[in-house]
């Protein structure tokens, strides 16, 4: 592939990627999704009018997670999840509040609950997952972490939460929400299930995750078969998460990013690890089978464009951390407009004048001649 051809393909991909942003996690028309894919070179399909888009194959994703849970070496692939779990645990330690009723969405093999075993304020812990194998894995998996705790495993569809309104003090989601089709709807259900002053805290993959693999697959398929298919799922951006939390009426939403770069020997090892994590592709309109030539070309392009001096290839994992609260009168509230005691303009003027005065004093001290000791 010559440089001019790569440049044309990258420009083509940038337009396609902006089109794919149309069908992120928010509801949108099915027409927008297929139009973006058709522009990218995929095969167009008949579109029913006024149909709500379903981006991910939920049943396929459940099978992916079940397969990962059955793997005897599944703990070998949980390093990203362990990092996210530790991040959630650290943030919970900063919240000075008791949580009698807790639910974790996408509990996996229960790492977070084991970290929270020192929290004696937790009376009921709902462990929720879409894969039944995760809810029964390991000896004494559902044994209480302390004498007052009751662990309740729940097999759920996380797009339809089973909790009663205002029944939970804390809801946690660990690397799970990036596979739901209706993220605004799930946020609204979480908000409804929280008690007043309840907390929602979660981590999900962000839009820059696996951008190297996405680009390599696009270039490889364009070279071999003349079209582009979605092999890395569309992911949400930080600004989108903040807007959706505010739209769901959460108060004090806070969103930040962690970016991890993990080195792998080659692209094939990366894809093996994604399979072991249960993070294989589940986009409905992607090609179900990728031919051998396209995979080999994509792996070669990955190494050529992103390979490091030591022969490895990096993979980026962007983690979107979020925390938000259910409204309560006890929370800090902004004052009514017009009740301010001081003008920000006058405060800025006073601050500037004091700073200017200090600078002038310092400059005068520097200009003063240093007294010389008399010679003997």
Image (cartoon, rainbow, N blue to C red):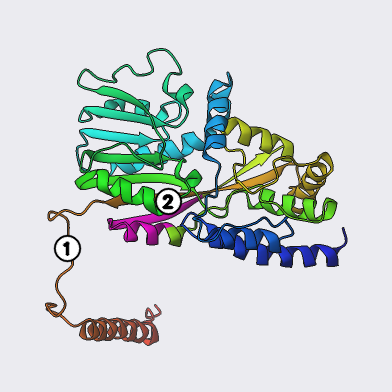
Determine the secondary structure under disc 2: helix
Q: Residue furthest right?
A: 2
Q: Residues within 10 Å of mark 2 (few under 14, many from 20)?
A: many
Q: Mark 1 vs mark 2: which is more N-terminal?
A: 2
Residue beneath the point at 39% across and 33% down: 156
Determine the secondary structure under disc 1: loop
Does residue 74 appear left or right of residue 8 in this picture?
left
Res 236 seen here = yes
Count of numbered badges drawn on the protein: 2
Residue 302 sits above or below residue 99 on the image: below
Q: Name the residue that disc number 1 marks.
A: 333
In terms of image quadrants, where is residue 45? bottom right
Q: Position of residue 267 (x, y in %)?
A: 73, 40
Res 112 seen here = no
Residue 366 sits above or below residue 144 on the image: below
Q: Are marks 1 and 2 in contact (CB under 8 Å)?
A: no
Foreground of the two, 84 or 370 = 84
Q: Position of residue 75 (x, y in %)?
A: 54, 25
Residue beneath the point at 14% across and 80% down: 338
Q: Which residues are magenta?
A: 241-258
Q: Position of residue 218 (x, y in %)?
A: 73, 54
Q: Name the residue that disc number 2 marks.
A: 183
Residue beneath the point at 44% across and 50% down: 182
Q: Is residue 255 magenta?
A: yes
- Per the model, the C-alpha gap separating discs 1 and 2 is 27 Å
Foreground of the two, 281 or 99 = 281
Q: Which mark is residue 76?
A: none
């Amino acid at each position: 592939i010559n440089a001019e051809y790569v440049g044309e393909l990258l420009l083509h991909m940038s337009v396609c990627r902006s089109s794919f942003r149309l069908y992120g996690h928010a509801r949108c028309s099915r027409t927008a999704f297929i139009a973006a894919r058709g522009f990218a070179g995929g095969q167009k399909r008949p579109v029913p009018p006024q149909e709500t888009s379903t981006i991910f194959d939920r049943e396929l994703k459940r099978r992916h997670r079940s397969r990962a849970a059955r793997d005897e070496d599944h703990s070998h692939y949980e390093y990203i999840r362990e990092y996210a779990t530790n991040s959630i645990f650290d943030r919970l330690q900063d919240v000075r509040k008791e949580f009698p009723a807790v639910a974790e969405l996408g509990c996996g093999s229960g790492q977070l609950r084991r970290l929270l075993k020192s929290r004696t304020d937790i009376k009921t812990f709902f462990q929720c997952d879409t894969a039944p194998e995760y809810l029964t894995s390991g000896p004494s998996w559902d044994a209480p972490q302390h004498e007052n705790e009751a662990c309740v495993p729940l097999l759920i569809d996380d797009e339809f939460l089973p909790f009663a309104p205002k029944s939970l003090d804390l809801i946690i989601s660990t690397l799970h929400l990036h596979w739901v089709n209706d993220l605004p709807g799930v946020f609204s259900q979480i908000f409804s299930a929280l008690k007043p002053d309840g907390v929602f805290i979660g981590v999900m993959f962000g839009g820059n995750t696996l951008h190297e693999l996405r680009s390599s697959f696009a270039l490889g398929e364009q070279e071999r078969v003349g079209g582009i298919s979605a092999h890395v799922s569309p992911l949400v951006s930080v600004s989108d998460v903040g807007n959706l939390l505010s739209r769901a009426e959460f108060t004090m939403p806070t969103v930040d990013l962690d970016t991890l770069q993990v080195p792998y020997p080659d692209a094939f090892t990366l894809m093996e690890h994604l399979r072991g994590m249960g993070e294989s592709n589940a986009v409905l309109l992607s090609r179900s089978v990728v031919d051998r030539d396209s995979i080999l070309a994509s792996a070669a392009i990955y190494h050529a464009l992103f390979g490091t001096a030591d022969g490895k290839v990096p993979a980026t994992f962007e983690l979107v951390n979020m925390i938000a609260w259910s409204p309560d009168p006890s929370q800090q509230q902004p004052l009514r407009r017009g009740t301010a005691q001081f003008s920000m303009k006058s405060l800025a003027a006073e601050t500037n004048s004091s700073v200017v005065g200090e600078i002038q004093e310092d400059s005068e001290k520097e200009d003063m001649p240093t007294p010389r000791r008399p010679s003997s």
